[in-house]
Amino acid sequence: MIKIPFKNESIRIPKRYKSLIDEINQFEKLFQELTDTELRSKIFELNNEYQKHQDLNNLITRSFALTREASVRTLGLRHFNVQLMAGLVLNNGKIAEMKTGEGKTLVATLPASLNALSKKGVHVVTVNDYLANRDQVSMGQIFRFLGFNTGIIQSGMTPIERKKNYNSDITYVTNYELTFDYLRDNIEFNPQNIVLPAFNYCIVDEVDSILIDEAQTPIILAEANAIESPEKYVFASEITRYLEIDTHYKIDEKNKNVIITELGVEQVEKITQTETLFDRENPWMSFITNALRAETLFFKDINYIIQDNRIVIVDEFTGRIMPDRSWGEGLHQAIEAKEKVPIHPKSTTVASITYQNFFLMYPKLSGMTGTGKTSEVEFDKIYRLRVETIPTNKPIQRKDLPDLVYKDQFSKWNAIAKFCNNISSTGQPILIGTTTVEKSEMLAQLLSEYQLSYQILNAKPENVRRESEIIAQAGQTNSITVATNMAGRGTDIILGGNINFLIQKELYNILVFAKTELTKIQLKKNSDNFSKIVNLLNKLEFENQFFQSEIKLFEYFKARSIIQQNQSKYQKLIQTLQSLTKCYSQKFFSVLLSVINDEKFLKLSDINILRILQENDRIAIPTLSYQCAIRFMLNDLKSYFQKPHNQESQIIKNFGGLCVIGTERNESRRVDDQLRGRCGRQGDPGLSRFFVSLDDNLLRLFGGDKIQNFMGNDLLDNSPIESSVLSKSLTNAQKKVEERAYQQRKTLFEYDAILNRQRNIIYFERKILLNKSSIESDILGYGEQLICNFLTNQQNKTFNILEISKFFEYLLHRKIDLKLLERLKEDPNEMNIEELKIYFFQEFWLSYEAQLDIFSIFGEGLDIFRSFEKQIALSGYNLMWQDHLEKTSLLRDAVQWRSYGQKNPLTEYNREVSIMFQKQQEIFVYLTIFIILNVSIV
């Protein structure tokens, strides 16, 4: 058991948290004296106490102290007081803003353990599969020590695997998988395939990235649909060559849109030989608009890359590829036509939801980030989340130098390369943040001209595979790392490099070399039928029997020769391994021999060896002998490399720490702060500086008239411009973009909030049907509802017996007695509606019972009918909602024009969507009844 003495931490903690933290520290002293078994028994006590009182507030201090002690005993990590404060903030349903390197991952274990006591489930949401897996394996040791079970959701899992993992006490999952599981659950036909339990508590890591950046567009579950015509996309792409900017179309870069002029419309109509581009039978406008957008606003290695002959979107906020996503409304197909890759079918929206409305379904929500304060207003207004800044464990020593502004791109990039050359000459490590794949590779070429070595990390697959290693070693002496946006990388940059990666690589090379050489020897044995020869040799050695025959004598010497050859090869391998490991401890070599002679180890693939090395420190108690040996060797290597690593780390600190360079200001201040935060972690020194040019997109589009005046001046000097006007313009430009983006998200949220009410109704009703074994009562209810609505509507019309009879004959699939309908009249012009309702109720019940009787004749026919009517109703909900989403999408675009008529588009949308929803429900009821009453056994 690892013992870490209690230390008084001098960080200033706000008064509202100080008393709780002091109490946690008092419990820590008590829990340090307990055995592992006694410590676990404390968790059972908390469980029992919660079951009695159903109140977590009285358990906070004890739970936090237990989790801290479990962390010390499993991972050797003790939560700092500031981390306890962050845990309390998270448990209060707030956002904890913690600087990079302050241990957000470890903080999440505190509220997660506490809320797991309720047995209602805790979801820890991360931004990618790598982080979800890493955190579940490492932090899971703490939870398992305390008696909680953990789960992880990864892409490619089956519904059974997902359901099992979601039912864990604590589940690690990406925002992408979580939202799509929710949408899939609500179009499911088999209740056994529903994977998500009821929502309880959610902790969102990189909360600003998920709830702000990725909340710009709704999450859409789509399925492939028949494409209108691939030729149209190709033809539209060719047509763009005959259209001129400003004459035939205008580009709106701010809104990423293209507006076709009247001359442009005439030109396209002439080329396509159509009377109008808006013809319903042969529409062209959407194809031309998307083709122009693809040509002028979406670029390779900026907005997307081409991988395996497919267009793959690059996330503008994280720099990661999104292989499972596509642009909607035909834009993706237009880009495919532009790049001359296979055009995939256009997708149809089956279900959708915004991140705003999705995460608001959690009764308790909290989040962690390094940069949340600048978006505090949005978090509060939309998610009802307050942001609290957590003090750092050690004072920040990072220096943020003022921006250097250049007149154009050429001057700026040359200045960056020259700056890197000067800094690199001192040995100080450099991290350069770029915004696109194209710019990262262009800068790499400039660095090559200065003969500087560098590592490049962008969305291209060959670089993504080495992501963690590249970032982990970005703090080594003389290293230069060029990376696209750094949000959510999940790996800390340690000065001097990450020693864990270094020793893993060293041991991996030794083990793989030894296994490969041993495998060659084994292959030689097999090729000479070695086992049979050895058996024969054993027989011949008894009583000198080999002298009885020349053949036996020959076989004996042949077998002995093979053994000697293999023994010679083995001895050479041992000598080589000895020379490779002679600088390590004496025990290291003997432990290494025990590993390479373990048959189970020899059966491992190289990838599995690497996985064992990477996850070894996350396994609480190794179960296999070679795992124990590998842990010893890793620890031995760590003690060997630790001293030179500490020396290199100190040298880099003397240089000034990691130098972070921003190649342009991002549209969001948060993204800039994320890049700056990569240096100066845990009290280390660091340096950050941004290089800006007057023609950067941010200043060009949002800088205002003063920037345009600067650009209009003839600036001959390549030296940076210093001006308070420029600095203010940069800040104002970012604020403009942030405010604009916030308004877009707010509008998206407001429109989806209207749909969300209807979505909740549909999903609730559908869920009730899904969990029923028979929906007979619902079908009868639908029938009565349909009859009442139809007859009520007839009251507002001129009474027509023939119209009523035809409607019900078609619906009920049976003859209607017209004479009886005539007798139900009270006078020539008025109908007794109540009598009519009773009559048609009876007719409907008779039709339904007749269907049941017909199917019950055929063995299990009644069960088939019950299943059939349930599937029809569930399918009806799916199709109704799918059609509703398509119509509301068109409506939302249409109502925007009503603002010119002094009408509020949102109010108009609300009114018309409500009417549409009511009509959709009526259509759903009619079609469900019609299909069920008219189906027949063939």
Image: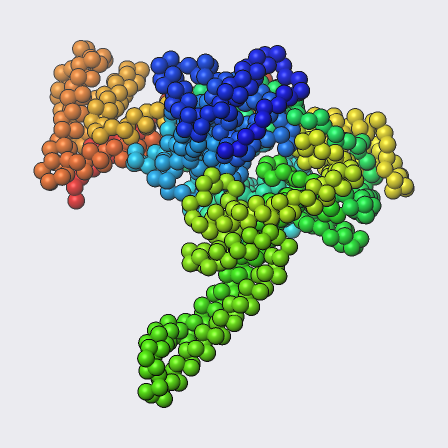
Residue 423 left/right relative to 931: right
- Residue at image position (52%, 46%) is 631
Q: Which of the two residues, 75 or 534, is positioned nearer the viewer here?
A: 534
Count of marks, rendered view: 0
- Residue at image position (75%, 48%) is 478
Q: Which of the two residues, 351 or 727, is positioned nearer the viewer here?
A: 727
**Residue 157 in sight in this render:** yes
Position of residue 380 measured from the top left corner of the image (x, y, whole percent): 57, 18
Position of residue 134 measured from the top left corner of the image (x, y, whole percent): 51, 39
The quarter in which the C terminus is drawn is: top left
Q: Residue furthest front?
A: 543
Name which quarter of the figure residue 817 lies in. top left
Name which quarter of the figure residue 664 lies in. top right
Residue 2 left/right relative to 680: left
Q: Classify 152 as above or below 917.
A: below
- Residue at image position (71%, 26%) is 395
- Residue at image position (49%, 65%) is 518
Q: Which of the two residues, 425 or 902, is positioned nearer the viewer here?
A: 425
Position of residue 45 measured from the top left corner of the image (x, y, whole percent): 39, 20
Q: Classify 305 as above or below 258.
A: below
Position of residue 53 measured from the top left corner of the image (x, y, whole percent): 38, 13
Residue 291 left/right relative to 157: right
Q: Residue furthest left?
A: 857
